[in-house]
Image (tube, rainbow, N blue to C red):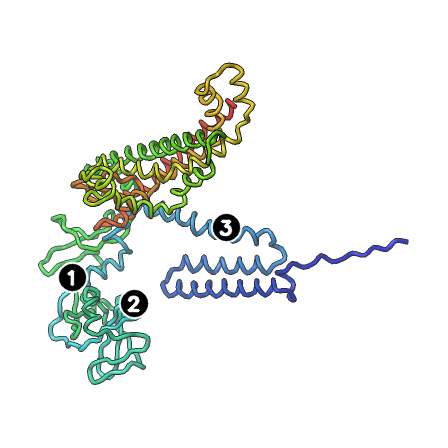
Amino acid sequence: MSTSTQQSPRLSHARDLSRPGFIVKLILMALVNALGIYGIMASYGQEEWGVLAFLVVTLIVVNYVYFSKRAIAAKYLVPGLLFLIVFQIYVMANTAYVAFTNYGDGHNDAKGPAITQIMKTADGRVPDTPTYPVAVLDRDGEIAFAIVDGDEVKVGDIDEPLTVVDDAVADGDRVTEVPGATILNISEIQQRQNEVLDLRVSMTDNPDDGWLRTDNAAMAYVAKSTLVYDEAADTFTSAEGKVYTADPEQGLFVADDGTTLSPGWRVGVGMDNFTRVFTDSRLSGPFVSILIWTFAFSILSVLTTFALGLLLAVVFNDPRVKGRTFYRAMFILPYAFPGFLAALVWKGMLNQEFGFINEVLLGGTTVEWFTNGFLAKLAIIGVNLWLGFPYMFLVSTGALQSIPGELAEAAVVDGANPWQRFWSITLPLLLVSVAPLLIASFAFNFNNFSLIYMLTGGGPNYPGAPFPIGESDILISMVYAIAFESGNRQFGLASAMSILIFVVVGVVSWLGFRQTRKLEEIV
């Protein structure tokens, strides 16, 4: 007679109600749900329906996965998949979408808000309307107006028209207290005077009723647009009779004489952003120069850092060298120093007026490191060599130690000299290991934005270019200048250039890995 006893599998920490693991899971899920619900409420308030739908679906999936017995594998995959969707797929899809639009300064929103903004920026006081003592408020960082209209206190801002606030307090015709807001004093108003003077608060939801504005932050008056919008004809007519007709291809209201109204609205422009860098004469010249310099910078950075790192690795791989551990530790120091801080330090050392390089090493010579294009590029290559050779020294040292010593001994027996052994045996075997790292280093330097931005800022600038781009800019810093540093920011053009950079890096990496396979076949 045999007896068998089957023990039920032990529950994991996350399922056993009596163990701390379940309590920890419950707390973490409560935090996730709280953040998710907050995001849903915020999305609803901003009318971001796509974000709201994504958060709702995500919360349902996350709760099902972490409270279900049938989705064990998904518990490990869901966090990574969510980050993949948010930080990779969404970013790439949005960049691709923006690249085919005219999104940028003057074309930031849809057509409806653009029409409202045009009317508000071309306004004047409405005759025979009352003026109101106005209180300037700060509500969560946003400027708002508060007035006494009859027996009621009304508050509004750039997004919301004047609305009655029942629990606000007024002293006569001036508002003295509004719950959830701070009334700014004279000093605070002066610090934010541009925001105050630019603010237009709609009287009602109907734009034809006008809006409230102020010229002195003490009294406000009702204003209306001097332009008349004809919705049926989709035109604006000025007080002088000039007619501006909507152009759906440019996203602008255009008059017969070519003048336009600002702002416009966002429209699709097809391949215009991709072709503009080649067809705009003010941009094509600097773009070609920057493209060539980007390749030169990336290739020279890889070659110089690899050459110096390999040379030092070969020298300090020789057991006859005393104190190798100390020297290797010293070589790693530049790699341990934050790159952007090192660039700032070098920027100070290369200062042409009082930098250490000019004052001490060059005996007081004024070398224009940052105002001469060639010297600026030379400085970038030099600083990047200082920053990059420790990495190549480390990988070369590791690769050298993995090469069997018997090969070198056999070569010695065959009569090969040191150079022949290095060129025919050491270097090919070493390249098999480090070639993928060299390709990765090329891709990194192709987009080495922080070094350029911190050291030279891309300067000296090209005269006459439509954007603040310079001779030492590489493509990625050029994209940044177009997107964020220009007085006329062009996000669509910057996105198109980002896609071009992605294609170039992808093609170069593909070609590089094909060459790596040939090295493996040799071995």
Do callouts 1 and 2 mark residues in contact (Cβ within 8 Å)?
Answer: no
What residue lies at 28% left-to-right and 56% top-to-bottom? 109
Q: Nearer the viewer, mark 2 or mark 3?
A: 2
Q: Secondary structure at mark 2?
A: loop
Residue 189 sits above or below residue 231 on the image: below
Q: Which of 416/239 is in front?
A: 416
* Quadrant in the picture for residue 468: top left
Q: Secondary structure at mark 3?
A: helix
Sequence-first disc among 1 and 2: 1
Marks 3 and 1 sit apart, C-alpha to C-alpha, by 48 Å
Sequence-first disc among 2 and 3: 3
Residue 305 sits above or below residue 411 on the image: below
Marks 1 and 2 sit apart, C-alpha to C-alpha, by 26 Å
Sequence-first disc among 3 and 1: 3
Residue 219's spot in the image, x, y percent? 16, 75
In the rendered structure, find residue 469 and report the number of the disc placed on it.
none
Do callouts 3 and 1 mark residues in contact (Cβ within 8 Å)?
Answer: no
Residue 302's spot in the image, x, y percent? 37, 33
For label 3, the crowd category at 10 Å Cα-Cα, with few meaning under 14, some 14 to 19 and many 20 or more, is few
Q: Secondary structure at mark 1?
A: loop
Query: Which kind of residue does numbered mark 1 sit on?
Result: Ala
Residue 456 sits above or below residue 169 on the image: above
Q: Which of 498/515 is in front?
A: 515
Q: Is residue 348 left or right of residue 75?
A: left
Dot 1 corresponds to which residue? 122
For label 1, the crowd category at 10 Å Cα-Cα, with few meaning under 14, some 14 to 19 and many 20 or more, is some
Dot 3 corresponds to which residue? 81
Q: Which of 23/72 is in front?
A: 23
Dot 2 corresponds to which residue? 141
